[in-house]
Amino acid sequence: MGKHSGFQTKRVIILGSTGSIGAQTVEVIEHLNTLTHQSESSIRFEIVGLAAGSNHRQLIDQADKLAVRDLALANAPGRFDQSGLNFRLGHDAPRRLIEEVPCDLVVGAIVGIAGLDSVLRAIELGIDVALANKETLVAGGGLVIDAACKSGASLFPVDSEHAGVWQCFSAMTPMSYAPPMPAPESIERVILTASGGAFGTQSRDQIMHAKLAEALNHPNWSMGTKVTIDSATLMNKALELIEAHWLFGLNADQLGAVIHPQSIVHALVECADSSVIAQLGAPDMKVPIQHALTHPMRSRACADRLDLAKLGILDFHEVDPDRFPAINLAMNAIRAQGSAGAMLNAANERAVEHFIAGQLPFGQIDHCVASVMDELSIEPIHTLADVYAADARARACVDQCCPNKAGETR
Ligand SMILES: NC(=O)c1ccc[n+]([C@@H]2O[C@H](COP(=O)([O-])OP(=O)(O)OC[C@H]3O[C@@H](n4cnc5c(N)ncnc54)[C@H](OP(=O)(O)O)[C@@H]3O)[C@@H](O)[C@H]2O)c1
């Protein structure tokens, strides 16, 4: 971080800047810089690089607005106007952006396994990462955590539930600059809350042929397409349980999920002495994004404040394992280790692609993932190539199990 006239400058690269989390990160940074300008904060954020998948127009608009010159685009169109901009193009463009542009913090907000190699590279280079991209840890958690231990880089969770656990843990440990870890014996269980997604309490039969637009109609959160569909199958919670396993070093028996339709309590930590510490906040991703950017300081929020009296009631109920098999699939993957996480993640990504394309009924997504986990053997993971091999096997298996047999679902 550079120091100029009383404030420090933190240089940030946003991977996935054109998506829901990426755009909200830009908003939070603009808000925080306003606070710095008004002498309410001593850190000024400078966005020095942006990366996206294929949306070159939005990326260029962001670059113009934010005066950023260094960009990465993974799936570039044949020809487009790059004048005045320093573009890296191709699937490894986000990784090259990280290698070539000096920065203090990377925000990992690419969707899917596509985000793994750039986040891993940042961690290997010792750069702190504010991580939204849960698939990175689900598929390559062992590699990322090993790299962080070697380089000393910190991972700051952006996912609201993990940001919640992190804040609960802060209440159990002395202040620190990296995510705090209480003594393992002081934790009985960490519970992540799930809204239940678009279909609330509807039965499997009712949602078997749910349409894409219905699956995207999330009651509380406005998010990207894939994560919203994952919320409706509870695969999002399944992926988050695996993410929590890697982030906090918890085993499957120390992890659980509970349905909480209001999405106000994000996470609960049950301590050994039976005390339960919970983290609450309005369902607005700008809150955990800001927390990851400003930790260990707190700044004035750019989100609505929580009004519990207005809310009145908070409900909690158990996850029905028959209706939401994804949760048990995640627990099994945590116990199995090796390539299980990469396979589960890839099978889900591919099954969701089939659903979006109208080639798989909504109610078959998690069954398709379960078939892949039954079908394929679990292999050890030593390298990124091992992760990609497991990913490719799982995708091929989905394509064999579910070859366009559903007809039109949209
Ligand atoms: N949205 C939320 O509220 C939320 C909450 C918690 C966690 N998360 C997690 O955060 C991640 C991002 O979610 P999102 O909702 O922001 O997704 P999103 O709106 O779909 O945005 C995804 C971003 O990734 C970019 N991208 C896709 N493929 C890429 C590739 N191969 N290389 C580089 N960039 C690529 C997209 O670029 P284009 O625009 O060019 O396609 C876009 O910028 C996911 O892992 C999700 O689970 C999201």
Image (cartoon, helix red, strand yellow):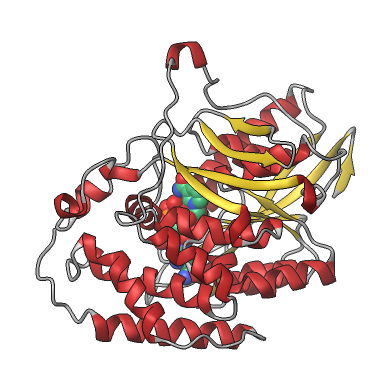
Between residue 399 and residue 363, name the one nearer to us.
Answer: 363
Q: Where is residue 409, by image quadrant? A: bottom left
Identify the residue shown where x is 43% and y is 33%: 316
- Labels in figure, total: 0
Asked whether 68 or 323 is in front, the reply is 323
Is 326 positioned to the left or the right of 390 in the image? Answer: left
Residue 301 occupies which quadrant of the picture? top right
Q: Quadrant of residue 15?
A: bottom right
Res. 390 in view:
yes
Give the residue at x 69% y 70%. Answer: 144
x and y, in percent, of residue 332 in the image: 50, 69
Residue found at the very far front of the displayed protein:
273
Nearer to us in this view, 362 or 205: 205
| Towards the viewer: 320 or 206 | 320
The answer to whether residue 258 is left or right of residue 103 is: left
Q: Is residue 18 at least partly visible in the picture?
A: no
Quadrant that contains the C terminus: bottom left
Q: From the viewer's perspective, is residue 255 above or below residue 315?
A: below
Residue 230's spot in the image, x, y percent?
Answer: 37, 56
Q: Residue furthest top?
A: 309
Q: Is residue 70 above or below residue 333?
A: above
Question: Where residue 290 sits in the image (x, y, percent)?
Answer: 64, 37
* Residue 79 rendering spot, x and y as whole percentages: 39, 74
Query: What residue is at 20 percent from the left and 69 percent from the top?
Result: 360
Q: Residue at x 62, y 83 (%)?
A: 384
